[in-house]
Image (cartoon, rainbow, N blue to C red):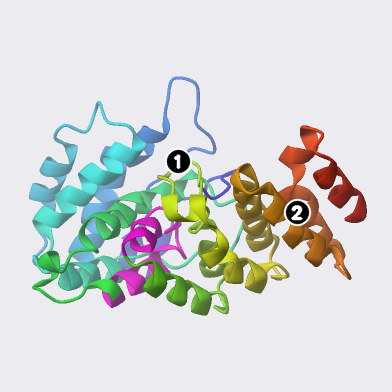
Amino acid sequence: MKKTKASPASAVAPLNLRLPAAPRSIAKGSSLADLLGPEAIACLAHNLSVVHRNFEAGAFRRAAETGLAPLGITQRGAHLAAALRAHLPSRYEDAIEVLLRSLTPPLQATDDLGLGVFFYLPHVCFVATYGLDEAHNGGRDPFETSMRAQHEITRRFSAEFSIRPFLIRWPERTLARLREWTRDADPHVRRLCSEGTRPRLPWAPRIPAFVRDPRPALPILEALKDDPDLYVRRSVANHLGDIAKDHPALVFEICGRWVDGASAERKWLIRHAVRHPAKKGVAAALRLRKLAK
């Protein structure tokens, strides 16, 4: 999940699109679920009404708020995605066109993103729930539409959760697209390539095939190991840390190759990648951290 420190003020985008206000951090007595409450639903209804004149904002808000109170943050994302499904065009690719037109401008920073980015969790859930089955898309393959949607959503929040069902359903197609995206100009997109393929991504279902054999995603890590943005390199390090839980020898071999002639930035990545086995006193990890000083 993306690092959250501070909240942006309510943003005003072209077409008078809005983001809800969000706290700098979760205060005592509050929860992440509060980020997808009535104000966020009102902003979502407003933004969709701006770009789609047939959108029934009142009916959507009533459906979205019904049964919302007891739900956690991820459950609320799924609940709002279902409400969107009921009130957007019935064909998936048409619904996605509306959702994409309603997006506020992409993030310009890679830190201090704030908690307001959770506004786009329902959009992620919408793609993950309805973007895999051609039955939701008039019998047409939804893959390209879903990839386009995730490319845009990850520039505003993160598509690391929605990309994972595609890696499970269509591993070769999805990995091929992510390898292309490692060359994208936007660091949020490049980070998705590493973060979304992590075998044991926190808050998300594991990818069993990558837990068993992480090698299919290794070309992505090779492509990003010297990324100019720390935001991306940190994800590569965390990805290696995931792999090390099941295949430590593989990670030690990779880091051993990478440490030869490494820049200061890559040395930091290596130290970060093996920090957990090093804390347990694993000799290979301790040696790598020493070499990467």
Instruction: In this rendered view, identify the residue nearer to me: 23 or 36.
Output: 36
Task: Specify whether 161 is left or right of 94.
Answer: right
- Asked where in the image residue 209 lies, by quadrant, the reply is bottom left
Q: Regarding mark 1 in the picture, which secondary structure is present there?
A: loop
Query: Is the magenta region chiefly helix, strand or loop?
Result: helix
Q: Would you say residue 268 sits in the magenta stretch? A: no
Residue 53 visible, this orientation: no
- The residue type indicated by label 1 comes to Trp
Which residue is more in the foreground, 31 or 53? Answer: 31
Q: Position of residue 50 (x, y in %)?
A: 22, 66
Q: Position of residue 264 (x, y in %)?
A: 86, 62
Residue type beneath disc 2: Phe
Residue 98 lies, in percent from the top left, at 22, 69
Spatial CA distance of label 2 from label 1 is 26 Å
Tell me where residue 270 appears, x and y as whole percent: 78, 55
Q: How many marks?
A: 2
Tell me: 89 left or right of 287. left
Left or right placement of residue 78 versus residue 24 in this view:
left
Q: Which residue is mark 1?
A: 203
Q: Residue at x 45, y 47 (%)?
A: 116
The residue pinned by badge 2 equals 252
Which of the 4 image quadrants contains residue 218? Answer: bottom right
Which range is magenta?
144-169
- Depth check: give the residue in front, 137 or 120: 137
Q: Closer to the camera, 121 or 6?
A: 121
* Residue visible at 17% across and 54% down in the picture: 84
- Point out the frontmost of discs 2 and 1: 2
